[in-house]
């Protein structure tokens, strides 16, 4: 448990909530995801159809036809597939190595074990129902232990860190012809390049959905306090009726 900071008379207490490794990863990852999504949409515009299997072409049956993404959402704004691929591959390396950095740092400082470990009691119906009702009431923190993560936070962060981001990295590698020569098993793992491309898109959509919900909850929980805690590490405990 991270120690609380001393509070001055008449002020609310603060707790040291986010270690520097978590904060660095958060902001680097935010920039990387922004660039990857924008450049990925440009790449998708080149062939906006998704398939399952090995091949995939204009005459194959696509399971999804995506819309043409407007220039204000793409990187670069003007259609340039070569530049979009350069941006995408460059920030994919940052994306992958930042996850490796987070995993190593979080194992060393016990962030995963302390804050994100899911226990059997977290999945009891009463616990899940209580946390669900608290979210509906816009109370996101336990007044008895305000810096602790609730079960929905643990589940969402675990899904992002251990499922969605690794899927993005592995399917991205599977789509690379250069990697297929050395790691042919990776392409087989996802059932072909087109299946890997579809899973890559689904994982990206999952990250977008998480980001939208995350930003909405930050706004509802108090954006100044939440953003400041991700910059300085220190989070001011709100009054009991507001948490």
Image: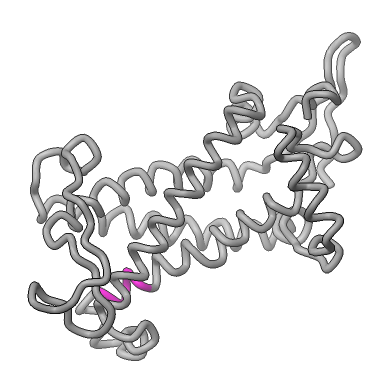
The secondary structure making up most of the magenta span is helix
Give whichever of 87, 240 is nearer the camera: 240
Residue 112, x across and y down, in percent:
70, 59
**Residue occupying image coordinates x 26% and y 74%:** 175
Q: Is residue 42 above or below residue 104?
A: above
Residue 84, image x and y in percent? 17, 51
Residue at 47% x, 55% y is 98
Q: Is residue 135 left or right of residue 228?
A: right
**Magenta highlight on residue 159:** no
Q: Position of residue 162 (x, y in %)?
A: 56, 66
Instruction: Give the left or right position of residue 87, taking residue 169 as reference.
Output: left
Rendering coords of residue 104 (x, y %): 60, 62
Q: Is residue 173 magenta?
A: yes
Magenta region: 171-175
User: Seen in the image, is 7 located left or right of residue 149?
Assistant: right
| Quarter occupied by the C terminus | top right
Q: Quarter-wise, where is residue 225 in the image?
A: top right
In the picture, residue 28 is in which quadrant? Answer: top left
Question: What color scheme is it?
Answer: one colour
Q: Please give the name of the residue rendered at 74% of the width and 58% of the height, measured from the top-left corner.
A: 110
Q: Residue at position x 62%, y 42% from top?
A: 20
Taking depth in this image into account, of 97 and 242 the one nearest to the observer is 242
């Amino acid at each position: 448990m991270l120690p609380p900071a001393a509070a001055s008379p008449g002020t609310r207490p603060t707790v040291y909530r986010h270690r520097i490794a978590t904060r660095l990863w958060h902001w680097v990852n935010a920039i990387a995801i922004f660039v990857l999504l924008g450049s990925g949409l440009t790449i998708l515009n080149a062939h906006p159809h998704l398939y399952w299997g090995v091949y995939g072409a204009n005459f194959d049956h696509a399971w999804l036809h995506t819309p043409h993404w407007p220039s204000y959402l793409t990187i670069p704004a003007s259609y340039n597939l070569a530049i979009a691929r350069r941006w995408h591959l460059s920030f994919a390396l940052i994306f992958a190595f930042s996850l490796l950095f987070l995993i190593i740092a979080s194992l060393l400082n016990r962030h995963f074990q302390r804050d994100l470990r899911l226990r059997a009691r977290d999945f009891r119906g009463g616990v899940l129902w209580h946390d669900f009702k608290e979210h509906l009431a816009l109370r996101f923190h336990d007044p008895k232990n305000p810096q602790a993560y609730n079960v929905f936070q643990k589940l969402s962060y675990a899904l992002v860190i251990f499922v969605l981001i690794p899927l993005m990295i592995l399917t991205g590698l599977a789509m690379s012809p250069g990697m297929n020569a050395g790691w042919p098993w990776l392409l087989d793992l996802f059932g072909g390049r087109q299946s890997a491309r579809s899973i890559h898109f689904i994982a990206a959509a999952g990250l977008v959905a998480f980001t939208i919900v995350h930003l909405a909850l930050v706004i509802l929980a108090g954006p100044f306090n939440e953003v400041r805690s991700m910059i300085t590490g220190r989070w001011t405990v709100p009054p009991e009726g507001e948490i």
